Amino acid sequence: MQLNSMDMTRISILGAVCIALNIGLNKVAAVLQLPVFMDTIGTILAAALIPPLFAILVGVVSNLLGGIITHPAIPFFAGTQIVIALMAIYAYRRGWFERLASAVLVGFAIGVVSAIVSAPIAVLMFGGITEPGATAINAILMAAGQNIWTAVLSGTIIVSTIDKIIAAVIVWLLLQRLPNRLKLARGSS
Amino acid sequence: MSGIQTRHVTLLVAGTATFAALCAIATLRSVSLFALYILLLAATLVLQTRNVGILWTMAKWLLPFVVPLLLIHGLLNTAHDVDYWFMNVLPIRPMGFVYGALVSLNILLLATVAGYWLNTNRDDMIDDLIRLNLPMWSILFISQGVAVGAIVERRVATVYLAQRARGICVGPGVLARIRAFPSVLIPAVIATLIEAESRVPALVSRGFGSANVVPLPRKARSALAQLPWVIGPLFWLVLTGTLQALL
């Protein structure tokens, strides 16, 4: 698809807002003391607003910038953002964000897959320490005799699933309320 | 402050420090030399920026990882053997503490590298990216992503206060805060997206995207003055690597 300067500017601006949502809402969740990350709403929303390649870049750039703004550990999870973006793009194209029930299922699937992708990084690079809620579950499981891999995977799946279901429901709510002109046509590439 | 101005790190220096740090993680096997490398890298950063405060920022990044790491692996993780019991209550697992300390060193190195990036002047960084001939949309992604992030935070805070004033229950309790999250978030996000979209015609009408962007002229910066800070991280890597090979 040939993009003119108006399209490119629109994509750049909306992509930048999605990056800002990833970074900003992560900090807001921390301020509100919510036991979730909230750092993927922008990536999932980008799947519905801008072309796929740019939606993937939103995830990657968010994590690179998050490394400077929020915490230096964040860039290591850029791969997780790519997986989340790919799953969100597929789900949006299939129309799974049009109903609440399917959006919840998408959130659940994204949560499980992103936990599986993140767990090795959390174990090998950070000794199993991640977001406080997941870390607490990991600690309990390790104290109960589970090995670090099982503990981290279990803890991350629990927290990540809740986090991504909330993110998917919020994106569903946003897509219900956003003007149609902002949304990407589902068949576009 | 003592009147000494903080100096900024250039994109080249931050990039070199990142590259050298990744090489250090991959090559330095000796724990003491790895720790020495981190110390030298951090000292170089403080010397260059003349900003001791960056050490405090690094500590704030580090502590939420290090404290749980030491407590979980040194006390709770049953994969490590208990050597003795403190006051017959706490199991002490020395190998767990050692593991926690080793992982903490990795995180300290990451925090040091992030310190370099944090001290990079954002305007200079965007200028450097333009000079690298990156596509304009990618530069806009980065610059606007940072700028709008602060706007989103402020807007969410405003909506949060407004919803509280309207009587929407935003706490106490985690469940109440989670339930209130959409009512705070949705108006803020929609307003931000619509406002952002309205900027597109304004940018295009000013020629954005139809011509090459020229970086702003900036104060002449001696390339020679930057050289030690570019070479520093690489030199420390070679030095510690050589020591590792010799010892």
Image (tube, helix red, strand yellow):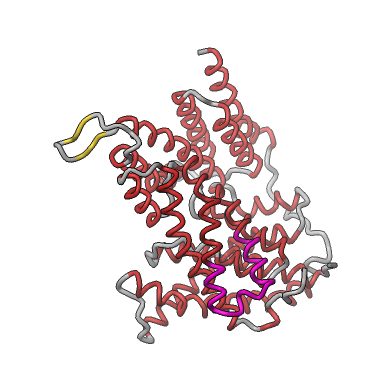
| Residue segment shown in magenta | A84-107
Q: Which residue is drawn at 41% across and 54% down?
A: A155
B65 in relation to B80, above or below:
below
Q: Which residue lies furthest to the right in this view?
A: A2
Q: Residue at x 52, y 61 (%)?
A: A111
B85 or B196, nearer to the observer: B85
Residue B143 seen in render: yes
Q: Which residue is drawn at 65% across and 50% down?
A: B125
Estimate the x, y position of residue B205 in percent, counting from the top left. 79, 75
Estimate the x, y position of residue B36 in percent, counting from the top left. 47, 26
Q: Does the magenta stretch include residue A101?
A: yes
Estimate the x, y position of residue A180 in percent, counting from the top left. 68, 83
Q: Residue at x 83, y 70 (%)?
A: A4
Count of numbered circles on the image: 0
**Picture quarter containing residue B175?**
bottom left
Estimate the x, y position of residue B5 in percent, counting from the top left. 50, 45
Q: Which residue lies furthest to the left in this view?
A: B87
Q: In this view, does A98 lie to the left or right of A71?
A: right
Q: Does the magenta stretch include residue B238?
A: no
B73 in relation to B152, above or below:
above
A186 in relation to B132, above or below:
below
Residue B2 seen in render: no
**Picture quarter containing residue A92?**
bottom right
A98 or B229, nearer to the observer: A98
Q: In this view, does B87 lie to the left or right of B104?
A: left
| Magenta span dominant secondary structure | helix
Q: Residue furthest bottom?
A: B166
